[in-house]
Each structure stands twice: as C-alpha cells, then as structure tokens.
Image (cartoon, rainbow, N blue to C red):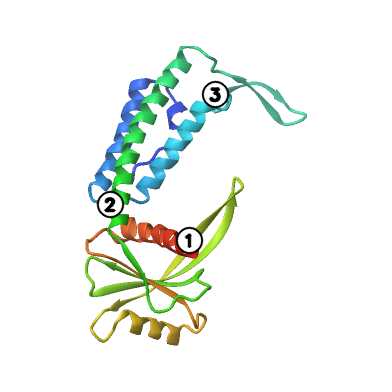
Amino acid sequence: MKTLSHTWFAEGYIDFELKKYTLLAYLQEIHKEFTQNKLYPQLSDIIFHHNNILHFKHNKEMLQDQFPKKFTHVNMDKLQLLYEKIVEDDEMMKELEDIIQYAVNRMSATIQDGAGIYEFVEEKLNILPVGIIPLENNEGYFFLCNGSYHQTNVYQYRLSIFEKHDEKYRSIKTSFIAQWRRTIVNTYENIKTELIRIKTDLPNPAVYSIETDLSFPLEETLLPVAKRTLVKYITANAA
C-alpha cells in the first residue's frame, strides 16, 4: 500500500498542486481497498496521518521546528550543529497552511467512509457466550464465523488494561489456534470441551462465539472489527 511519511506535507518542494496530487494518489489507494471492504491497515494509517497533520496545524511553533534547516556554524568543541531556520511566516507558510487545510478536509471524508464500513460490519456481528462465562474473563477463546457457518476459526485472547492521559483503556492480544469444521456433532460446546482437554493452561476459559451472515475479508476487516467489538462486549457486560 502506498503510504505517506510523517511530515509529507512539509518535505521537499512545498507546492500546493504537488502535495495535492501526492495526497490524492494515497487516498485513491485507500478507497480502492475500502471498495473491497478491506479496512486495515488502511483505516488506522489514514487516521494517524489525519491526527498528525491536525497536531501540526494547532501547534505552529512545533510546525516550524519540522521544516528543513541549514547549518550556520559548527561548534567543534561540543560537536553541536547550530541551525538557522529557513522558514518564517511568509508566502511559504501560507502555501503550507493551504496544503494542510485541503488535506484535513479530504482525509476527514475518507475516514468517514471507512468508519461507515466499520459500523456496518460491527452491526452484522452477533456475539454470544458459549456455556457459562467465569468471573475471570480477561483470558479465553472466541470462535469466529465469516459468512459460512461450516468453518470456525478459533482464537485465544488476552485482555489487558493500560492508562493513557489519566484514563484506562483495554487492549486485546489474540493468537490463532485452529480452524474447526462445524457439524451437528461438532458444536461450539464440543469445540470448547476439546479446547479444555488439549490446552490445560486454561481449565475454565471464557468462550464467545462471533458470527456474521455476510462474508468479509478476514485479516483486513472481520478479525480486527471482531476483536474491538469483543472488548466492548466484555467491558459492557462487566459493568
């Protein structure tokens, strides 16, 4: 996937038309993936660039610090390079501000498109506990069915809590276990029983099924959306 550097809008020759076509080429590839219902890593990437460029927009002094600089003096004693800023508030800054505003608008529209797909996929997911869920449910398994209920992908998950800006968040780590073929005999309950038999490190695991009637790209869409939705489900039911 074509990507952008962190400061693509301020690198090299700062020209609105040049940066515009650089951005449009990037967004074209994002939209190409979105039309195939492939969300990740495209959605995360564009959200990063959108937030990054907003950060520059609202922190003008920091913005200026990111511009190219030229050597003015070499202090051999301290091995320091002293720089003189090239850029000040002039026509180049105005050109950059136009680039940033255009990029923010176009990226915002693309993020909305991706968010719409995300919400659609999330609405189509049905999460249910398999058997009795223990009080300790920060670790366990989930069964993921994509369109066809004949195949079930089994993942082990582990939830953890981290703090950011004085707020607590939950993150999830997963690992693929195996793929089971579901039959009348090989039900979710039987798969759970088999997991407990072969993986003795979790004798009483929390197990959830995540199903959808539609088919979505597994790695690029269904799995990442399912993981985030499961975190929300567990958090809501623990409250």
Which residue carries the number 2 mark? 120
Q: Which mark is residue 195?
A: none
Q: How far from the left and from the top, in percent, is residue 66?
A: 54, 28
Residue in the image at 76% along x and 30% along y:
78
For mark 1, does the 10 Å Cα neighbourhood hold few (<14), some (14 to 19), or many (20 or more) residues? Answer: few
- The residue that mark 3 highlights is 60
Task: Name the amino acid, label 2.
Answer: Phe
Residue lying farthest front? 239
Q: Earlier in the sequence, mark 1 or mark 3?
A: 3
Q: Is 67 situated left or right of 29 in this image?
A: right
Kind of residue at badge 1:
Thr
Disc number lying in front (1 or 3): 1
Q: Secondary structure at mark 2?
A: helix
Residue at the spot 55% in from the left edge and 27% down from the top edge: 59
- For the residue pair 107 and 91, the one nearer the viewer reads as 107
Label 2 vs label 3: CA separation? 38 Å
Does residue 158 sit above or below 92 in this rendering? below
Helix, strand, or loop for circle 1? helix
Give whichever of discs 2 and 1 has the lower sequence position: 2
Residue designated by label 1: 235
How far apart marks 2 and 1 lie (CA) works out to 21 Å
Q: Amino acid at mark 3?
A: Lys
Residue sitting nearer the eye, 84 or 177: 177
- SS at mark 3? helix
Q: Is residue 198 above or below residue 42?
A: below
Residue drawn at the location 45% of the way across and 60% of the way down: 236
Q: Is residue 150 left or right of residue 156?
A: left
Mark 2 surroundings within 10 Å by alpha-carbon count, few (fewer than 14), some (14 through 19), many (20 or more): few
Q: Are marks 2 and 1 in contact (CB under 8 Å)?
A: no
